[in-house]
Amino acid sequence: MIRLELRKVLATPAIWTVVLGSLLLNALIIFIPTDPTWPGDPPETENVFERFDAQFIADMYIAQNNLSESAAENVRTLYGRVQPVVDESAKHADALSPYLGFLTGWVHRQVFGLIMPIAVGEASLLALTMSLMCMGHEVAHDTEKVLIPTVTGRALWRVKALASATSGLALGCLVMGTTVGFVLVHWDFSQAWDSFVSSSFNHGVGGKLFITWDRLTVATYLLEYLAVGLGVVGCFILLGIVMATFVRNPWAAIVTTVVTIILLGVGPRLLPQASVARAIGESSPLGLLLSSPQWLTDGDVNAIWPHFETWGVLGSVLILVVLTLVAGCRYAKAEL
Amino acid sequence: MLSLHNVTKNYGTFEALRNVTLDFTPGVYALLAPNGAGKTTLIKMLATLIFPTRGEILWNGDDIVALGAAYRDILGYLPQDFGYYKNHSPRQFLLYLAAIKAVGRETAKRRVGELLETVGLADVADKKMRAFSGGMVQRVGIAQALLNEPQLLILDEPTAGLDPKERVRFRNLISTLSKDRIVILSTHIVSDIETVANHVIMVQDRHIIANAAPAQIVSLLEGRVWETDDMAVAGKSGLVLTERQENGATITRFVSDSTAPQMVSAPGRRVWPVAPNLEDVFLHTYRDEA
Ligand SMILES: Nc1ncnc2c1ncn2[C@@H]1O[C@H](COP(=O)(O)OP(=O)(O)OP(=O)(O)O)[C@@H](O)[C@H]1O
Ligand SMILES: [Mg+2]
């Protein structure tokens, strides 16, 4: 059954055009820019975490963003929790990890600040498209009236939801996996896997020290990053299922979904920085996508709790699972 | 076998059917009613696409919605307007539907072949449906309804779009099918009913107003249908049904309860009684509807 539903969506040439287009774009971004060269000898590595005061970052955020007192308190509390992480890294001298040597800053920014965020975005868009297409297929073809009064009946909705999840995750893995493949072809990571990502060669994404909540090696960082990416892809799959069920006309469903995503992305930006409301608001699927360069780290000024991406994914998934169940119950009783 | 008890259906505040009570045993039932009377509404409830606002629909004593898959398994349904996958061939489409209907692979292949033969589409079985005419699509729809050899076959305007030859073929098909199953079809085409239906169900003003054999329904107008070659007579004495040209004269058919001899005896006027048919009953029953 699920195979038949998968065949309907995967047989659409448009999907494969988007897949190929995405991979082509990623390949261009990876292979075209030339790596910078270092004039003279590379600098010495130093244990940058030693005697580092995490409140320094807090004060920087507070000053730069003119935070209110409660927001400033949120930020100070967070960096109070960052301090032991910094001390632990200092003790183990993680910052002395070679990673990719003097190329580290550039490659890390390219891979985790640009290429992978794009790949996760493409995977999410594909997954969303797959579930909108899969769930809306019979309304679009006006075939519900033929398919539902059969022994399968409204259980077809479940089959389609499973097909959406399967195809969305599969295409997500395909795009993200292939992109990682390109990255590994272009840069030699073979010596880097066991290095810590908090290398002092790595000046992070925002120009500040790159601090992860757990002491992550390049390999574990990549794996956890991909796991969070799949979580976000999962959110978009569920969002597609929910939208296509509540808004029955497929075109209206697409428009509503786009509007919803934009509102979820823009809305929280109107909230005060570093507030709890803002942090929750930026945990929407789009908010998570936009923050992907900071996943697994202390985040930007608006990330006010540790592992913001994990809680964001869990929260979004939880809400969307509930909405999906409501949608399923609603479809079971819907007049068609 | 299939029965409706006091079924009422509202769309929001609009009441489409009220207190419909009907019993169906094997045979062919024709729903005859004008556009918008509620035929599709009734049929969609039987197909569990929509649900009664009040009342219940029972199959062998059990509620059809509660029976769920077990009920839908014995159901064959042709919707009034339905979509299909344009880049599928009839064979692919029917095989897909057979899978949805949980018909085994081998059985499905055989059934699909037979049904394509039955509805006269064997020679285009592997052509894409994109280029099909309305009548051809309709025949795919009829074949689809029969895939699971349903005990309860419900067809919403099955002959819409069929040419006379295909319509005859369809009637013969229904006659052979109706031996031990319930066939319910809606139609506006009176000749379909006269040839295949054992029962005619008429709906008016949200109610079932008739449920009887065609002959019995026709007998309602026994002795009240006339024809004349003088239009003035028809207009004055009753409801004009139809007009036709015959040997250069216009023959008007009308219903009148007033005493016939009076009209016949008028000088120079010719009026003669005729046997009523279903069309007369239809036109007479729904005379006030727009
Ligand atoms: N989904 C709906 N929402 C509101 N009103 C509806 C809906 N479906 C049908 N109706 C109304 O219910 C009445 C019965 O419609 P229905 O389609 O059952 O008629 P029908 O007898 O099948 O007509 P036709 O011969 O044109 O197919 C009509 O007045 C129609 O406008
Ligand atoms: Mg209808």
Image (tube, rainbow, N blue to C red):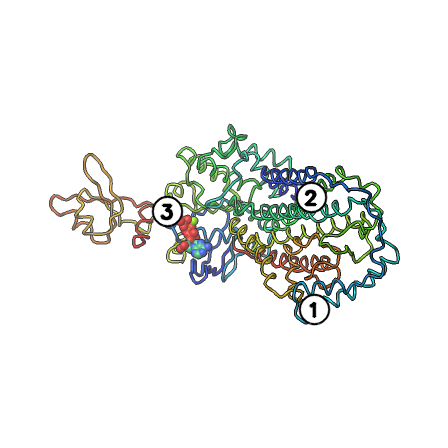
- On what subunit does the disc labeled 3 rest? B
Q: Which marked residue is nearer to the observer: mark 1 or mark 3?
A: 1
- The residue that disc 2 covers is A170
Q: Which marked residue is nearer to the observer: mark 1 or mark 2?
A: 1
- The residue that disc 3 covers is B215
- Left or right of A129? Residue B221 is left
Q: A252 or B98: nearer the eye?
A: A252
- On what subunit does the disc labeled 1 rest? A
B12 up-or-down from B173: above or below: below
Q: Where, by quadrant of the figure, is residue A111 drawn? A: top right
Secondary structure at badge 1 equals helix
Question: Farthest residue in the front direction?
Answer: A40
Spatial CA distance of label 1 from label 2 is: 42 Å
Question: How far from the left and from the top, in percent, is residue A117?
Answer: 68, 48
- Left or right of B229? Residue A19 is right
Are the residues under badges 2 and 3 in a single subunit? no
Question: How far from the left and from the top, in percent, is residue B279?
Answer: 33, 45
Closer to the N terminus: mark 1 or mark 2?
1
Question: Farthest residue in the left direction?
Answer: B267
Mark 3 vs ligand 1: CB under 8 Å?
Answer: no
Tell me the quadrant of the picture where the N terminus of chain A can be found: top right
- On what subunit does the disc labeled 2 rest? A
Q: A48 or B203: nearer the eye?
A: A48
- Which residue type does callout 1 highlight? Ala
Secondary structure at badge 2 equals helix
- The residue that disc 1 covers is A72
Q: Residue at x 70, y 46 (%)?
A: A116
Q: Which marked residue is nearer to the observer: mark 2 or mark 3?
A: 2
